[in-house]
Amino acid sequence: MKNVELQTYIEYLKNYDGPEVTFMEVCGSHTAAIAKSGIARVISPKIHLVSGPGCPVCVSPSGYVDRLIELAKTPDTTVCTFGDLLRIPGTQYSLNEAKGQGASVEMVYSPMDVIALAKEHPDHTYVFGAVGFETTVPVYTVLLDEIVKERISNIRLLTALKVMPPVIGWLCDNGAHIDGFIAPGHVSVITGSKHFEALSRQYNIPFAVTGFSPKELVLGIYGLLRMWEQKEELLAKGDSLTKNFYPSVVTTEGNTIAQAKVEQYFEPGPAVWRGMGEIADSGLYLRDEYAAYDAGSRGLDEDHKINKACRCDQVLMGKISSYECPLFGKVCTPLTPQGACMVSSEGSCYQRYLNR
Amino acid sequence: MIITMAHGSGGAATSELIDEIFAKAFDNDVLNEMEDSAVVPGSGRIAVTTDSFVVTPLEYPGGNIGRLAVCGTVNDLLMRGATPKYLTCGYIIQEGTDSELLKRVANAMAETAAEAGVKIVAGDTKVIEGNGGIMINTAGVGFVPDGVDISATKIAPGDVILVSGNLGDHHATILGSRMNITNTIESDNAPLNDMVAALLENGVDVHCLRDVTRGGLATVLKELSDSSKVTITLEEEALPLNPAVRDFCGLLGLDPLYMGNEGKMIAAVPKAQAEKALELIRSAKYGEAAALVGEVTEGVDGHGDLLVRTAIGGIRQLDVLQGEGLPRIC
C-alpha cells in the first residue's frame, strides 16, 4: 500500500460523519494490535471499535481453572500450561495461587516441552492445560501425534478449545449491536475466509479479514466501513460482504492439512464461554478413540464471578467498553485482576489499561 | 571436573576451585594478595552499586552469565557518570556444575572486565545443593569526575531522548534460547564505557543516562517521566530494531518496548546538542544503531506521561511493564 493511499484511508476514517457504527474484533492479537496502534484516537468518534470474545484464556470458565487446580494438587501429577493461564481466577484461586500452596504447576513455552518432561519422569503424570482457538488447536495435534507415535502414556490434555464461527453467530443472535466484524486474521489462516463468508450471508453483516500492522488495520477498518456504507447495493447485486484484506497469508479454503489433523483428533461439542453461557458446537473435544489422553475436559461448566461488579461478560460481548466497567482501573488492574479480561495480555481490559 | 558440595567446604577442594578457576582468570595485583578485604587507592565522589545475576540458559548467543555480571554493574556505575574501577564478585554455584562451564564463565568475566577497564579485586564462592546452576553477584565502585552531575531528576522539558541502539536483543536471545528457536539474534550484553566517555569528554550537557534493562525502554522512560513529572513522547517509527527481533516479537506477540537489553542506554540531552550527542554515540563502540527517539515536554496536571506517536499518527499511552512479558498463545 502506498503512503498516499494510506493517508486517503486515514482521512476518510477521520472525517466520517455518518450514522454511528460499531465494529468488533474477535481475535486477541487484534485487540492488542488495535490498542497499540492508537487508531481509536485517529478515526472519527462515530466509529466505535469494541473487543469481542477473542482471547481464549479470557473465555475459559472458572470450572476449567478449578479442574486444573484439582489435577495439580493430585499426587504425582503436574499441570503444564502457558503463562497467561496461570493468573486467570478460578472459583477460589488461580493456578499461580494454588502453586504457592504446593500444587504442582509448570509454565511451558510450547506444548512440545511436555514430551521431554514426560520421558524424563515416566512415573509422573503431566496434564497439559490446552486452551485456544482454531489457530492453536493444530499445535495440539502435533503434540498428540508425538504422544501416539512415541507411545507416551503419562501425558493427558485438559482441553478448553473453542471455535469462532458459532460464537460470532451467537453474538448476532443475542442482541450485540455489531455493524461489522474484523475477522480474526490468525484463525483465518487455518480456517480460510469461507466461514466468515457464510456468516456474513446469514446475518448480512460485513466481515473484513485483516492483518495486524497499523497500516493493515487502517485498510481493514476502512474496507469494513465502505462495505457497511454500500451494504444495500452490494446485497442487491448479490456481492459478498466478506473481503480478504490479508491475502498474503489467508486463503478462502485455509490450511486444509491442519484442518484434517484437527478433524482426526477432535469433534465439536457444546462449550461454556465465561460470562456468556453454553454455545452449541463451539467447543472441540478429543474423539472417543483418543479418550485415554483426556483429563476430564467435558462438562466443566461452572462459571463464577470473583467480583460481583465485574462486567467482563458484557465487555466480551462488546456491549460495553472496558472504561464503562465500574471496576476498571480502580480495583481491577493487571496486578489485581477481578476478571479474565484484565488477566491475559490479549484481554481487552488489559490492553486498554496499558494503552490508555 | 564436576562441582560437589566439597568445593564449598572451605577446605582443600575450595582452594583448588579458587586457584584453578577464579585466581587464574581474574589475576591482578590486588586480588593476588588474597587478603580478607581488598585495599585500593581512590578518593573523591565514589559511586557504589550492586546487582545479582540469574539467567537461564547460563550461556547464550553473544555471551554468558559472566559477561552479563560485569556489564550490568559497570553500566550502572556509568549511568551516573562514574568511571568504573573495581568489582567484587560472589559466586553461588549449585553442585553438579561442570568446572569447564565455570571456567568459560570466569574467563568471559575477566575479558569483559578488561574491556571495561575494571579490576575484580575481591570474590567469594559458595556451593549449594541443586542441579548445575550458577548465580553471580557483583558490586562495583567507580569515581565521579568533578562537575559531572547526571541523575534521573535532571531530565527536563526541552530535552531529547536518544537510545544507543536496537531494542530487545538480549531479551529475544534468552527467550529464543529457552524456546529452542533458531535465529540470528545475539545478546547485546556490553559495557558502555566508550559512548559515555565520548559524551562527557566532548562537552555534552548530559542530563540523564539510564541503561535499558529489564522492563525495556517503556518501563525505563515511564519511571523517568513519573519521577520528573514530564511528558515523554516517542516516535514509533524512529525506534531502532533489528529486523530479526521485530519478526521474533511479531511471531510471539511481544512488544519490543517492554523487552530488556544488557548493553543499551538512553541519554537525555538538551535539544540543541541532539545532533552532536547522536554522532558521538554512533561513533562509539556498540553505538552504531543509535537514534533520536523522542522529546521531553512539560508534564500535564503535575504528573508524568509516556506517549508513543504510532506509524498512523495515533497516540498510545504507555505504563511500566505489568507482570511478566509472556509470549501469546493465539
Image (cartoon, coloured by chain):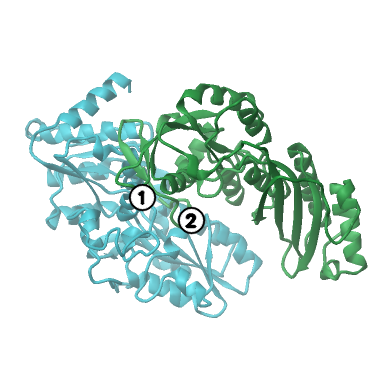
Chain colours: A cyan, B green
- The picture places residue B16, in percent across and down from the top left corner, at 91, 60
List the single residue furthest toward the bottom.
A75
Q: Secondary structure at mark 1?
A: helix
- Image quarter where the N terminus of chain A lies is top left
- The picture places residue A230, in percent across and down from the top left corner, at 10, 31
- Circle 2 packing at 10 Å, graded few (<14), some (14-19), many (20+), is few
**Residue A215 picture quarter:** top left
| For residue A29, side relative to residue A126 (left or right) | left
Residue B324: which disc? 2
Residue B198: which disc? none
Residue displayed at 22% across by 60% down: A325
User: Foreground residue, B79 or A9?
Assistant: B79
State which chain disc 2 sits on.
B
**Amino acid type assigned to the residue bearing label 2 in the image:** Glu
What residue is disc 1 on? A354
User: Foreground residue, B284 or A11?
Assistant: B284
User: Foreground residue, B213 or A320?
Assistant: B213
- The picture places residue A71, in percent across and down from the top left corner, at 47, 75
**Residue A11 picture quarter:** top left
**Amino acid type assigned to the residue bearing label 1 in the image:** Leu
